Amino acid sequence: MSDPVQSPANRPLRPLPAIIFASRWLQLPLYLGLIAAQAVYVVHFLVELWHLIEAAFGNQHALQALVTSIGYKSDVAVTSLNETVIMLVVLALIDVVMISNLLIMVIVGGYETFVSRLDLEGHRDQPEWLSHVNASVLKVKLALSIIGISSIHLLKTFINAGNYTDKVLIAQTVIHVVFLLSAMAIAYTDKLMSAGHKASR
């Protein structure tokens, strides 16, 4: 009795296609490097949060560290936490969280899309967006995340506007608008491609 014909899924690849396909694993160190960068962001977040807590209890060294890190300048020496400093520090912490979310999207979504399946189907902690992720969806989500990060930076700049020139304020606003237009263009292109793909079925 002859062996059944192997299905395409089980058929071994020829040597050259196998090498080319296996080259996707070269991206693994890149994603591991992003995980290390994520760890650095966690440490930075905790240090800034600890400085904020210490400054709230009157620690002048922690307060000056915060003022320096957020780039806040005032005509009067800052000797205690004020609303502006707290707001800028909190926005800086939110900025770290949003960049961390961006890293997670790139690490998890990129690995799932370009390297290998994570086999998270049915897992209770599977991200909702991961169930339908592909290169196009990932690009749109990354663009939206970048807009969110840019919005936080712009808000921080406007709150601390006295320490920036008009040229810097206008430049940051223009850059933010460019990010918005770019995200809209990416989303519209993805919509056109999805519509064309459905029509071809």
Image: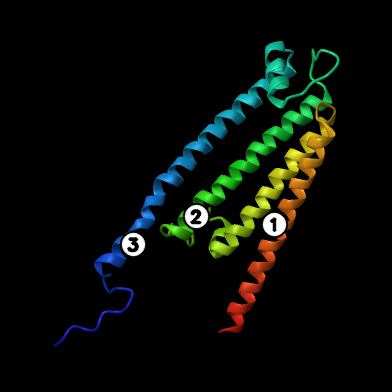
Task: Looking at the picture, tell me which residue is in the foreground, 18 or 113.
Answer: 18
Q: Which residue is under mark 3?
A: 20
State which tag comes first along the sequence, 3 or 1.
3
Q: Bin the neighbour count of mark 3 within 10 Å (Cα to Cα): few under 14, some 14-19, many 20 and up.
A: few
Q: CA distance from mark 3 to mark 1?
A: 32 Å
Label 1 crowd (10 A; few <14 / some 14-19 / many >=20): some
Q: Residue furthest front?
A: 167
Outermost residue on the bottom side: it is 1
Q: Amino acid at mark 2?
A: Gly
- Label 3–label 1 contact, CB within 8 A: no
Chain-order first, disc 2 or disc 3: 3
User: Sequence order check: which comes first, mark 2 or mark 1?
Assistant: 2
Report the front residue among 126 and 113.
113
Residue underneath mark 2? 110
Q: Which numbered dot is residue 182?
A: 1
Query: Residue 116, percent across and down?
Result: 41, 58
Looking at the rendering, which quadrant does residue 99 occupy? top right
Spatial distance from mark 2 to mark 3, Cα to Cα? Answer: 18 Å
Disc number placed over residue 121 in the picture, else none: none
Q: Position of residue 176 (x, y in %)?
A: 75, 47
What residue is at 63 percent from the left and 68 percent from the top? 190
